[in-house]
Amino acid sequence: MKVAYYKGCLASLSAKELDSSTQALAPKLGIELDELDAVTCCGAGDIHEAEPDYYLHLNARILAYAEQTGAETLMTICNVCTLNLRQADFQLKKDDELRARVNTNLETVGVPPYNGTIEVKHLLWLIADGDGYEQLKQVAHKGLKGLKVAPFYGCQILRPSKLLGFEDPDRPWSLEAIIQACGGDPVDYPAKIKCCGFPIEAGADVMVTPCPLCHLSLDAWQSKLNADRRKRGRAELPPMPILHLSQLIGVAAGLSDSELKFKRHVVPVKPVIEKLQV
């Protein structure tokens, strides 16, 4: 399946390991990536709040270039990018006057028009169901050997459900299905659908998230959390390795260290790998 591939800004900069593992994994899953080069950040939440019209133009431009690839799907690897692009697509499709004005502005800077002919889907959605899921089960030959994995969805891959709509935001199942297909044991805990919570108390070996912004928060802030706990005279929490979705599947599929790039993480992933080697 050929898809237009929008990796967003984090996977281009501070989370390059997300892009490299996705690029290495995609061919194994039967996904041909047509990477978008001449595109910008989707605006995250900042531009959306401060300059909503500018945000619409940014995302219309990304969607327009994605349409030019001829693919039916624009694949994302970030929750925030997924929501922003789908929300802009929703607004532009329902408002003819808005769409015409945005396209006129795009034309003045040499950008092709937005036509509303491509669907934005997260990598998670492409491999959690249907043909993608069947391919995943074949690819994950190395397996996770019963590794206890805490799924963390984050908020912007589930809500608002009218814009996302892949699964029930209160009872999601996609990450659990992928973990099981890879030979892991999903750990259930209440905070998995909240905004960047820590599931350390649930007995997980590792945590997986489909969002690089959630990954950044969860991976980078554990040391500061423990520093705060020490100041309060409370016991430190054990380190919890955080994996990107493509890295977790990549481990099960036998991708190399150079493709997974675990050395870029703040919390060491080595204990997880060592446990799988036992």
Image: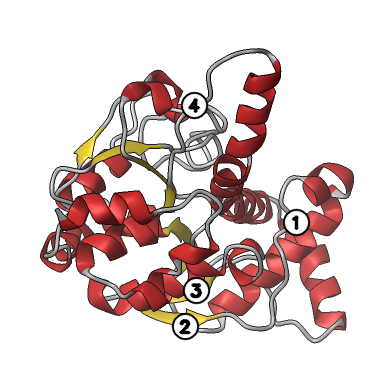
Q: Quadrant of residue 123?
A: bottom left
First in sequence, mark 1 or 2: give its number.
2
Give the labeled residue for mark 3: 5
Give the labeled residue for mark 1: 43
Q: CA distance from mark 1 to mark 2?
A: 22 Å
Type of residue at label 3?
Tyr
Q: CA distance from mark 3 to mark 4?
A: 37 Å
Give the labeled residue for mark 4: 237
Q: Which mark is residue 34?
A: 2
> Mark 4 and mark 1 in contact (Cβ < 8 Å)?
no
- Work out whether residue 225 can be spotted: yes
Q: Secondary structure at mark 1?
A: loop
Residue at horizontal 49 percent and vertical 60 percent from the top: 77
Is the residue marked by circle 3 packed among few (<14), some (14-19), or many (20+) residues within 10 Å?
Answer: many
* Foreground tag (1 vs 4): 4
First in sequence, mark 3 or 2: give its number.
3
Type of residue at label 1?
Gly
